[in-house]
Image (spheres, rainbow, N blue to C red):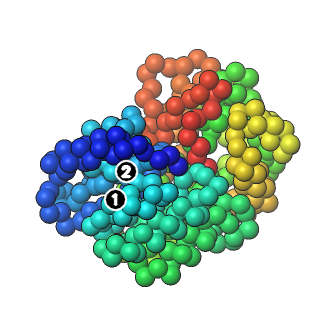
Amino acid sequence: MFSQQSQTQTQTQGQSQSQSQTQPMTPKHVVLVQGASGQIGFPVVAQLLRQTNRDYLVRAGVIDPNSEKARKLVDLGAHVVLMDSNRPETLAEALRGVSKLLIIPPRLETNTHIATTIIDAAKLVGTVKHIVLISVLGAESETTFFAKQFRPIEKHLETGGIAWTHLRCSFFMDNFWYYADTIRRTGTLPLPLRDGRIPMVSVRDDGEVAGLILSGRTRENPFNRVYELTGPESLRGDDIARVISQVTGNQVRFQSISFEEHKQLLKREAVKKWLIRAMLDLYSMINAGQISDRVTGDVERVLGRRPITFGKFIKHNINAFSASPSSTTTPMTGTTSPITSTGMPRTTIL
């Protein structure tokens, strides 16, 4: 987390005051999206602004209110506020008057502490009636690295006296931004997969589910419920390569590599050590078949439509994966990620 300078705070307050003039003075609901500039948070804010009316004020909590993403949130119509878990006063101010809150634990080794700190701050303000948490599929096992991070957050929320909803997300299709450069250059997809299958989900679907729940427009009461968000299919490594080949028109071959080879690949891409351990742990769970058959209907139950397929995800992001980029495709909203010179996305999502 990064602390903001006093100048930033002054600018942010000015932005917030200016923006609030376009919002209702006495909204019935104030919805706060923590991590609003991220790959899940941004589409959630967009969804909320589409789905809600003047009874709702959509507040976007960000670490850097002067970032390009923050400015885009303001352009959408959101009320941008500084939200830094290392500075409790920013949490209290961001949560003031909030009735609904989305928590997106950041992809940091300390995310358990960060998320529980935000939950405690929400309890203190006394106005929060519902908290939606972005979690991970399989959190209930408490055996994998990610499950050990997220299940304590879930438990802390469940015992906090506030209505809760856990959105347990499967492996993100968007993780394949990691491999886009390799796919384009070599025509191979190197993964430490054996026979395990992955019920991948699109970040866009996760964001739309969260947004619809926070808007209060779901067909069922989401309070104190767990939703397991997956795509409509569970794919093996060779299935994934085949889909990429069919959509891009370029032959892509799945290459089953060892965990050590994958570790070295991630090291070359400057992935942090703790995250490498977590990713290898995740692939171990997939190879053991622990989530292979967990294709659920929860996305469709909430959104009223089928989840995005992996083929559709590749089609809408074809320029990233094709050796012969097309000028006619448009990246899918909420799924794109700026690519670094090494081919890696700047934002880690898993």
Circle 2 SS class: strand
Q: Which mark is residue 326?
A: none
Q: Amino acid at mark 2?
A: Leu
Please tell me which residue is depicted at 30% across the width and 69% down the height of the picture: 99
Distance (Cα) linking label 1 and label 2: 7 Å
18 lies above or below 58: above
Q: In this orientation, does residue 303 appear?
A: no
**Which image quadrant for residue 96?**
bottom left
Where is residue 310 drawn, in percent x and y? 57, 43
Q: Residue at x 53, y 58 (%)?
A: 105
Q: Residues within 10 Å of mark 2 (few under 14, many from 20)?
A: many
Residue named by callout 1: 94
Q: In this view of the protein, which residue sits in the foreground, 201 or 71?
A: 71
- Identify the disc placed on residue 82: 2
- Give the crowd class for mark 1: few <14, some 14-19, many >=20 residues within 10 Å: many
From this viewpoint, is residue 343 visible?
Answer: yes
| Identity, as a three-letter code, of the amino acid under mark 1 | Ala
Left or right: residue 93 versus residue 18 is right
231 versus 241 height, above or below: below
* Among numbered discs 1 and 2, the one appearing first in the sequence: 2
Instruction: Confirm or deny contact between disc 1 and disc 2 (CB under 8 A).
Output: yes
Q: Quadrant of residue 34?
A: bottom left
